């Protein structure tokens, strides 16, 4: 009898584990909603930056030309490498820091203003809840609080989709009845440090402190949901209360990710009581050593966490290079590539297991 009871418990445990999934979202997840990918995003953000804040933009443009080795020519935005620009700005910030000229704890004026206009551009191109396409409504509706969503996106598309279908979400696992979105690269509506203007405390927005410190961080992250609405941004300027926490590409990322380091800490907790893993629209750049290391550290040993057999790793990515980029995962028996654009047929497959 005891043996049968133990078997029943194990079967019930396995059934519950199989219901719980991990979704890892990259920029390709948001593309079908019109959210711009890297090249288009940088171009649009720089145009907005130039129109609204020409003084600081002129300096960023000059640094961009230096980074491209074409200081005397007109800036060719189409061929400007995002990672290269951010790395060069990190060098400028290091130079200023060495001379005691750094603008704030969060970075140089140029870097903070670039983040601001990247975030503002994304908010302007992200559908509001009433306009979210059916693909994302369907994806949001099939989520449940025991799923884990890891997003490397800055945009608020998933938040809008969850709101559209009447589901709660949190960023810090503070509500067991809500879907948790772990945004490892930050978010358009986050900021690092107490809200302030010119160094003086100021809270004109309903900032909520996120509980990411885990006893090892000295500064808090804060989120303000109204910043997912473009209309709110019209009341703010860069270098003030709205100071988006975005982890930029390039070598400065090694510094930026320390602001939300607890989200990168002990990631095995994400996989311990979940089953299938879906990686959607995430390009795995060879120089993105943090994301690559995140997968190398976890996916290679993923079967050992829950002890429930049959776990799958599914990569949904239409890029021709995806098979090579994810070769270190796809060599495993339980991993497969769906070399396709993310669409509603995939959502049906998630729900069906």
Image: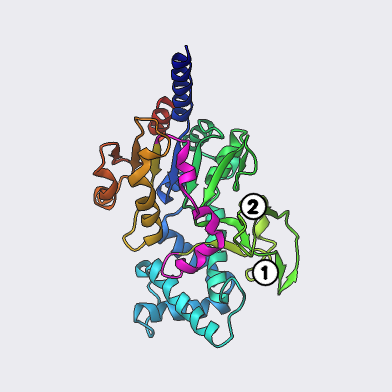
Q: Position of residue 262 (x, y in %)?
A: 55, 55
Residue that label 1 marks: 240
Q: Residues within 10 Å of mark 2 (few under 14, many from 20)?
A: some
Q: How many marks?
A: 2
In this view, the residue in front, 18 or 305, is 305
Helix, strand or loop status at disc 1: loop
Q: Is residue 174 above or below residue 57?
A: above
Residue 268: in magenta span: yes
Residue that label 2 marks: 211
Tell me the magenta residue range. Answer: 249-276
Q: Residues within 10 Å of mark 1 (few under 14, many from 20)?
A: some
Residue at image x 40%, y 39%? Answer: 277
- Cβ–Cβ under 8 Å for marks 1 and 2: no
Residue at image x 40%, y 56%? Answer: 291
Q: Is residue 174 left or right of residue 41?
A: right
Q: Is residue 229 left or right of residue 97?
A: right
């Amino acid at each position: 009898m005891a043996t049968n009871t133990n078997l029943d418990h194990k079967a019930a445990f396995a059934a519950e584990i199989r219901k719980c999934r991990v979704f890892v979202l990259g920029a390709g997840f948001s593309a079908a909603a019109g959210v711009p990918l890297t090249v288009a995003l940088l171009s649009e953000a720089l145009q907005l930056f130039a129109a609204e804040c020409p003084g600081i933009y002129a300096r960023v443009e000059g640094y961009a030309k230096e980074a491209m080795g074409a200081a005397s020519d007109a800036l060719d935005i189409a061929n400007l490498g995002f990672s290269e620009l951010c790395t060069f700005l990190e060098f400028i910030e290091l130079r200023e820091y060495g001379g005691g000229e750094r603008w704030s704890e969060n970075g140089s004026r140029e870097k903070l203003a670039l983040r601001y206009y990247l975030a503002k551009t994304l908010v302007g191109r992200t559908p509001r809840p009433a306009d979210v396409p059916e693909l994302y409504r369907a994806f949001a509706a099939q989520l449940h609080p025991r799923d884990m969503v890891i997003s490397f996106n800055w945009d608020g598309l998933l938040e809008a989709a969850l709101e559209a279908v009447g589901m709660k979400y949190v960023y810090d696992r503070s509500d067991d009845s809500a879907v948790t979105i772990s945004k490892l690269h930050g978010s358009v509506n986050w900021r690092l440090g107490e809200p302030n203007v010119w160094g003086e405390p100021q809270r004109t927005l309903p900032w909520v402190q996120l509980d990411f410190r885990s006893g090892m961080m000295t500064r808090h992250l804060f989120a303000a949901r109204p910043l997912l609405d473009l209309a709110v941004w019209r009341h703010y300027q860069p270098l003030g209360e709205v100071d988006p926490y975005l982890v930029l590409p390039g070598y400065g990322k090694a510094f930026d990710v320390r602001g939300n380091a607890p989200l990168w800490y002990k990631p095995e907790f994400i996989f311990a009581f979940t089953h299938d893993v879906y990686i959607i629209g995430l390009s795995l750049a060879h120089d993105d050593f943090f994301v690559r290391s995140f997968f190398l550290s976890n996916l290679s040993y993923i079967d050992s966490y829950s002890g429930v057999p049959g776990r799958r790793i599914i990569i949904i990515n239409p890029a021709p290079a995806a098979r090579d980029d994810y070769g270190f995962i796809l060599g495993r028996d339980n991993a497969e590539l769906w070399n396709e654009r993310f669409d509603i047929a995939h959502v049906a497959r998630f729900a069906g297991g």
